[in-house]
Amino acid sequence: MGMYIAFFLSVLTVAAFVALAITLFTSTYRAQKSGAPFYSTSKDAIRAALKEVKLQPGEIFYDLGAGTGKALLIGEKEFGARATGFEISIIFFCIAKINLFLHHSRVALVQKNFFYQDLRDADVVFCFLFPPTMQRMENKLKAELKPGARVIVYAFPLPTTSPTKTISIYDKWKMFFYKF
């Protein structure tokens, strides 16, 4: 009898790992199809960017492709912003939810493709998207952002809008700043 239980638990464990692998693969594929890679932005780079755009207490800060929620936490805890993140990947959404819970955060996190989110309330928007997605994002930002809204774009610039400033991050990446 014990041998059957051990066998059953082994099969169950393998099935759980296979299910997790499939979920991770499909979640990552879905995120890439939406245009957002997962690459962890350093806390220092996030802080520098939010200082550069002068994020103020009470302002609305959107993170498009929130990943693990790091930028949201910094925006909320260190700058006093009302932060909202959008994350399409169920895996990263869950990780971010846990991260926000552990930090006693009041950040709003939505599992949603940010292209279906109205951005008109945003004061500051942060995004890190693949180059093929940037034209679509630029069109969305131009159509929806209110005058004076600031945008931080990590790594790949908007195709036709000139940034107000560009800074290098660790001599490897660039951060582009825009004012609409």
Image: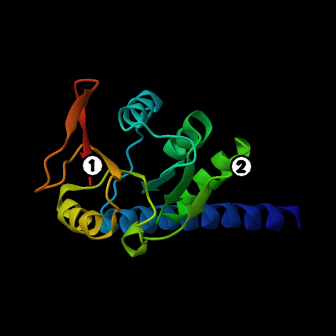
Q: Say how many tags the image has.
A: 2
Residues packed near mark 1 inside 10 Å, few (<14), some (14 to 19) or many (20 plus): some
Q: Amino acid at mark 1?
A: Lys
Q: CA distance from mark 1 to mark 2?
A: 32 Å
In the shown orientation, is residue 85 left or right of residue 49?
Answer: right
Label 1: which residue? Answer: 179
In the image, farthest residue toward the top: 170
Q: Image check: 107 left or right of 168?
A: right
Task: Evaluate if marks 1 and 2 touch, with contact meaning CB atoms under 8 Å apart.
Answer: no
Nearer to us: label 1 or label 2: 1
> Label 2, on which residue?
101
Where is 43 relative to 135, above or below? Answer: above
- Which residue is found at the position 59% from the left and 40% from the top? 80
Against 55, residue 122 (above or below) is: below
Q: Is residue 179 visible?
A: yes
Residue type beneath disc 2: Phe
Q: Please determine whether, in this image, residue 108 is positioned above or below residue 103.
A: below
Report which quarter residue 6 is drawn in. Answer: bottom right
For the residue pair 172 and 84, the one nearer the viewer reads as 84
| Classed neighbour count for the residue bearing mark 2: other residues with Cα under 10 Å, few (<14), some (14–19), many (≥20) | few
Q: Position of residue 39 (x, y in %)?
A: 37, 44
| Residue 115 position within the rendered picture, expressed as x and y whole percent measured from the top left | 36, 71
Residue in view at x 34 percent, y 54 percent: 37
What is the secondary structure assignment of the residue under circle 1? Answer: strand
Return the x and y of residue 1 as percentages of the image width and height.
89, 67
